[in-house]
Amino acid sequence: MKTVLVSGGAGFIGSHVTVELTQAGYNVVIADDFSNCDETNYNGVCKILGKELPLVKMDFCDAEKVDGLFKEFKIDAVIHFAAFKAVGESVSEPLKYYRNNLLSFMNILEQARKHGGNVLFSSSATVYGQPDKCPVTENTPRKPAESPYGNTKVMCEDILRDSIKAYPGVRGIALRYFNPIGAHPSALIGELPRGVPNNLVPFITQTAIGKREKLSVFGNDYPTEDGTCKRDFIDIVDLAKAHVCAVARMLEGRMEERYEIFNVGTGTPLSVMELVNTFEKVNGVKVNWEFAPRRAGDITAIWADPTLANEKLGWKATRTTAETLASAWAWEKHLKEIGK
Ligand code: WQD
């Protein structure tokens, strides 16, 4: 049985990936410093799987701790999620973002260099900026990042690429996520933003349940059919499954290059208004919303061409937007039940 280390495994994406990996037959070691989450998702993961998973509380910026972790466990692949991700905060606190997001990843790569290793990096469609043409393929040129957060994704991709080039034992895959939304069908794990959510779907669910008074739909004068932005919203369980495919590709020696990049999206864009309307219809609830001015830094539209992931990873998004938004709502109701 192969062992996969999931850094940031108690977070939104990490917890879903942990479940899918375990169900696919991998041993998972979760490491998280709980700086941006509590134990809700970790507990949910254990409940879904019916067993306790190894959990190491640690900060990946601590090189000695990372070294110790790789000595304690024989790790076959690492998936790196442990990073700060608030776009706005990264603009006011750039050093916090550069220090944490780059150093933690370099500490992992140092271990991969030493022991040989397979590294999966969680990148983002943010590296494309506002593309000249949609959908974007992996060869669409990257644009200079709009925020230090986005820049850490660009820089980590480059650090991974250069490390793979220099160190013969290192292989890696960067997955570029579009907009991950939804929750596990069990409603036991999901997105748990601290404070006011930055992202659309948690803001919708929190408004629908009464935690927030009103959703602001940022901008209705974009050059799209209904004037609101368009995104490629990808179900979190579908997204998690792409990681299982990518890990298998690395561990089973099926990579065609030592560094590969895949878009992880549905290939179908949806506007912000379409998403809000679908949420209301599917769940039979009203969302109090109003149009507000554009949000700084937002791009008009982006969606993926997922052909490469479909063909090479053997992965495809399967859940419908309706299913995904129903799971997001079930999760919000679960949070209310457990007093979160
Ligand atoms: C989607 C659309 C908003 C909130 C960001 C990061 C990206 C990635 C995912 C995260 C936009 C609109 C939103 C609200 C709204 N990284 N919106 N009202 O900006 O596409 O991507 O999150 O870790 O790197 O940039 O996602 O969910 O914030 O916004 O109208 O209250 O919803 O304007 O058009 P985004 P989002």
Image (cartoon, rainbow, N blue to C red):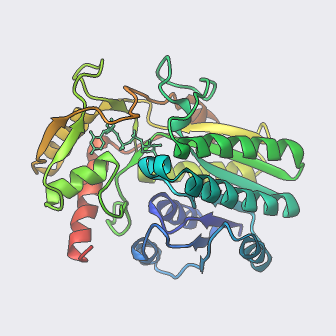
Q: Position of residue 76 (x, y in %)?
A: 75, 64
Q: Residue, x 73% and y 61% (percent of image)?
A: 108
Q: Position of residue 182 (x, y in %)?
A: 34, 52
Q: Quadrant of ligand 1?
A: top left
Does the rendering let one see residue 28?
no
Could you tell me how many numbered marks the image carries? 0
Above or below: residue 215 compared with residue 210: above
Instruction: Identify which residue, 321 or 338, lies in the foreground.
Output: 338
Q: Position of residue 326 (x, y in %)?
A: 25, 53
Quarter residue 338 falls in: bottom left
Left or right: 89 with respect to 248? left
Instruction: Identify which residue, 57 or 281, lies in the foreground.
Output: 57
Instruction: Identify which residue, 324 or 97, lies in the foreground.
Output: 97
Does the rendering let one see residue 97?
yes
Above or below: residue 7 compared with residue 309: below
Above or below: residue 211 compared with residue 319: below
Q: Residue, x 47% and y 50% (percent of image)?
A: 92
Residue sticking out furthest to the bottom: 52
Above or below: residue 119 compared with residue 164: below
Question: Quick one: quadrant of the N terminus?
Answer: bottom right
Q: Residue, x 78% and y 73% (percent of image)?
A: 67
Question: Quick one: quadrant of the C terminus?
Answer: bottom left
Q: Residue, x 64% and y 50% (percent of image)?
A: 121
Q: Position of residue 193 (x, y in %)?
A: 36, 61
